[in-house]
Image (tube, grey):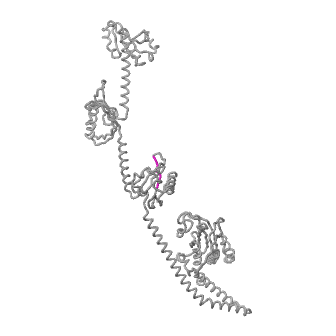
């Protein structure tokens, strides 16, 4: 062990090159002192071997004299220091070894840092540059050479931004660098527009800082520029789209809004703010429907909005009736769709609403006027018909009924007196049939024209149908008609005048039998249904008489006859209209039937069957609960 500059070192003497292989130079050696009395070639071999094993070892040469040093000049550049034995002062050896070790360590550290800088400049994708006080390039990264088209790394050295760019960019960049040199204040992340001499435009994010020497004096600038052209163009496009979208939203003739999942307004335009009764857009942002509508109304809309966000299914052209606080009611035509973030999560909804309040008011007024006109028209027509039929019936009663009664009595008398003659009895029977038919016509006329009294009680309409079919079984069998009966077992009761309703079904069944002279099938069914929407469950022309969600009873009577023409369907309920041949009907049966159904607040329609020949008579009645309410 030996002490060198207050540090203890282990000294190892190696006289043979072969012994060098058995020494751990890599980990434990700090310096090697070569005795230059050996041959030059052997010294070079030793230096090469030590350098290959551990470059952090300091190398020193000990020459015997200055003359020997002159003879081995090629060794000097390869070592850290040399000593002359003939002129060495006391203690100089240990001092020189210590200094050589320290100097070698510093040189190795500097070399490592230079290598790191080299790796950075050659591999970083950004442009890095160093400039002097005149803003001339001192050193640049490999990427910068490639970006600006320099094949030789030294070609850009000494140039300025004015050599690379037009004054539009070069002058502001030069001014920035001079400001940094004067003030020492860096520029961080500045977006610069680089305009090339060839017209190319690039956008970069630039950071520049002062370049200082070892005495901390500013000697120039250094900077790094990152290409952000795609980002800037995307931002510009986004800003253009944002301005366009804002213009559309602000000036749209419809109300536009965006809500988050909690129902808070994120975006609204002025028109939608007016729909809410708010004075400004700012008065809406961050608020919910509870701030503008009654609680029941707000909760109903929020439930609908939540369903849209949960299911991902939007709604289109939904008619919205809004009851606002302290302002008139509002009718809106609204469409809403879910609003998603970039990961696909629903974070709210977007909607657009058109004010249709004025149209709805006109619609309501128009419907009211039309309904009044239709009612008045029907009343006038019915009144005129009844008046005509009444006059006719009264005339028949006076002119025909009494003489016909005399004829009937005469026929009865003659039957009793002339029982022996078969031919005379056949004539009297034919006369009796004709008189009965005439009496039936008079009865129908009087029944149609006379005032109706009705006494309705809750009854099962199925029981009435079954009762009528029981005493009409003979008629069906005689006409060779098959009966198909499908009556719903859980049918609710209906307010009915039993006698009147029996007359309705007798008329319908007799009509069906009459249109199937060669036999056929009579289908009778009953169902309990709920009105779902206009045109569902029942024929579309009649559904306005019932409300959506209302319980109804539907009875269908279908035959397999020849059906009715379009002209016949239009007139089928008119008094005295009949599709039968003359003498086979008065044309009052269906008129009386419709009058009875109307008195029950029901509806009746007749239409040709779709899948086969024949007619379907459909009756619709409200259930007991509807009539009671």
Q: Residue 338 magenta-drawn?
A: yes
Task: Where is residue 53? Give x, y as percent.
Answer: 43, 18
Relative to 267, does residue 75 appear above or below in the rendering?
above
Quadrant of the rendered structure where residue 232 is?
Answer: top left
Task: Where is residue 424? Give x, y as percent.
Answer: 70, 92
Relative to 377, does residue 184 appear above or below in the rendering?
above
Which residue lies most toward the front here?
326
Seen from the viewer's position, the closer of residues 381 and 201 is 381
Relative to 499, does residue 24 appear above or below in the rendering?
above
The reply, left or right, for residue 466 in relation to residue 309 is right
Seen from the viewer's position, the closer of residues 506 and 129 is 506
The reply, left or right, for residue 483 in relation to residue 179 is right
Seen from the viewer's position, the closer of residues 429 and 183 is 183
Query: Can see residue 596?
Result: yes
Tell me the chief SS of the magenta region: strand
In this rendering, the count of numbered labels is: 0
The reply, left or right, for residue 291 in relation to residue 211 is right
The reply, left or right, for residue 375 in relation to residue 226 is right
Q: Residue at x 31, y 36 (%)?
A: 149
Task: Where is residue 518? Give x, y as percent.
Answer: 64, 77
Query: Can see residue 40?
Result: no
Task: Where is residue 228? Give x, y as percent.
Answer: 36, 40
Q: Residue 261 magenta-drawn?
A: no
Quarter of the image with the N terminus in it: top left
Q: Residue at x 30, y 29 (%)?
A: 211
The residue segment tinted magenta is 336-341
Q: Residue at x 63, y 86 (%)?
A: 439
Quadrant of the rendered structure where residue 496 is?
Answer: bottom right
Quarter of the image with the C terminus in it: bottom right
Quadrant of the rendered structure where residue 104 is?
Answer: top left
């Amino acid at each position: 062990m030996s002490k060198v500059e207050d540090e203890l070192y282990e000294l190892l003497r190696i006289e043979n090159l072969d012994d060098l292989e058995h020494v751990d130079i890599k980990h434990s050696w700090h310096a090697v002192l070569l005795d230059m009395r050996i041959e030059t070639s052997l010294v070079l071999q030793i230096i090469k071997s030590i350098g290959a094993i551990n470059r952090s070892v300091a190398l020193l040469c000990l020459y015997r004299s200055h003359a020997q040093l002159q003879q081995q000049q090629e060794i000097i550049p390869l070592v850290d220091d040399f000593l002359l034995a003939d002129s060495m002062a006391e203690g100089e050896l240990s001092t020189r070894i210590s200094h050589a070790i320290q100097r070698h360590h510093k040189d190795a550290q500097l070399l490592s840092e230079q290598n790191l800088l080299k790796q950075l400049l050659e591999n970083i994708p950004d442009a890095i540059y160093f400039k002097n006080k005149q803003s001339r390039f001192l050193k640049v990264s490999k990427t910068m050479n490639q970006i600006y088209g320099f094949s030789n790394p030294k070609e850009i050295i000494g140039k300025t931004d004015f050599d690379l760019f037009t004054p539009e960019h070069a002058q502001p960049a030069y001014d920035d660098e001079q400001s940094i040199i004067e003030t020492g204040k860096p520029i961080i992340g500045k977006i610069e527009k680089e305009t090339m001499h060839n017209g190319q435009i690039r956008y970069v994010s630039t950071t520049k800082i002062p370049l200082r020497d070892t005495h901390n004096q500013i000697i120039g600038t250094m900077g790094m520029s990152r290409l952000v052209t795609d980002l800037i163009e995307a931002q510009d496009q986004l800003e253009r789209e944002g301005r366009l979208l804002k213009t559309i939203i602000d000036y749209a003739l419809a109300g536009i809004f965006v809500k988050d999942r909690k129902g808070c307004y994120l975006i609204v335009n002025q028109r939608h703010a007016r729909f809410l009764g708010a004075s400004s857009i700012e008065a809406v942002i961050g608020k919910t429907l509870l701030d503008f509508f009654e609680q029941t109304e707000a909760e109903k809309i929020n439930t609908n909005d939540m369903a849209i966000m949960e299911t991902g299914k939007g709604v289109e052209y939904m008619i919205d009736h809004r009851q606002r606080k302290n302002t008139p009611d509002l009718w809106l035509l609204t469409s809403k769709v879910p609003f998603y973030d970039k990961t696909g999560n629903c974070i709210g909804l977007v909607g657009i609403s058109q004010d249709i309040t004025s149209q709805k008011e006109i619609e309501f007024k128009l419907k009211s006027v039309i309904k009044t006109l239709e009612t008045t028209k029907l009343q006038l027509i019915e009144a005129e018909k009844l008046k005509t039929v009444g006059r006719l019936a009264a005339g028949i009663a006076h002119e025909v009924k009494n003489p016909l009664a005399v004829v009937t009595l005469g026929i009865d008398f003659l039957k009793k007196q002339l029982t022996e003659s078969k031919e005379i009895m056949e004539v009297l029977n034919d006369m009796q049939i004709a008189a009965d038919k005439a009496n039936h016509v008079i009865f129908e006329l009087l029944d149609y024209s006379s005032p109706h009294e009705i006494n309705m009680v809750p009854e099962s309409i199925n029981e009435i149908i079954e009762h009528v079919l029981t005493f009409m079984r003979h008629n069906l069998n005689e006409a060779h008609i098959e009966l198909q009966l499908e009556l719903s077992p859980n049918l609710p009761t209906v307010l009915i005048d039993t006698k009147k309703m029996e007359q309705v079904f007798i008329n319908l069944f007799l009509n069906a039998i009459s249109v199937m002279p060669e036999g056929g099938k009579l289908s009778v069914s009953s169902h309990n249904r709920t009105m779902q929407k206009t045109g569902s469950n029942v024929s579309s022309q009649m559904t306005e008489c019932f409300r959506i969600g209302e319980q109804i009873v539907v009875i269908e009577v279908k035959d397999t006859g020849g059906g009715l023409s379009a002209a016949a369907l239009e007139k089928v309920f008119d008094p005295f209209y009949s599709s039968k041949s003359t003498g086979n009907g008065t044309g009052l049966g269906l008129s009386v039937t419709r009058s009875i159904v109307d008195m029950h607040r029901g509806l009746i329609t007749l239409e040709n069957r779709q899948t086969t020949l024949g007619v379907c008579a459909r009756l619709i009645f409200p259930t007991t609960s509807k009539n009671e309410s």
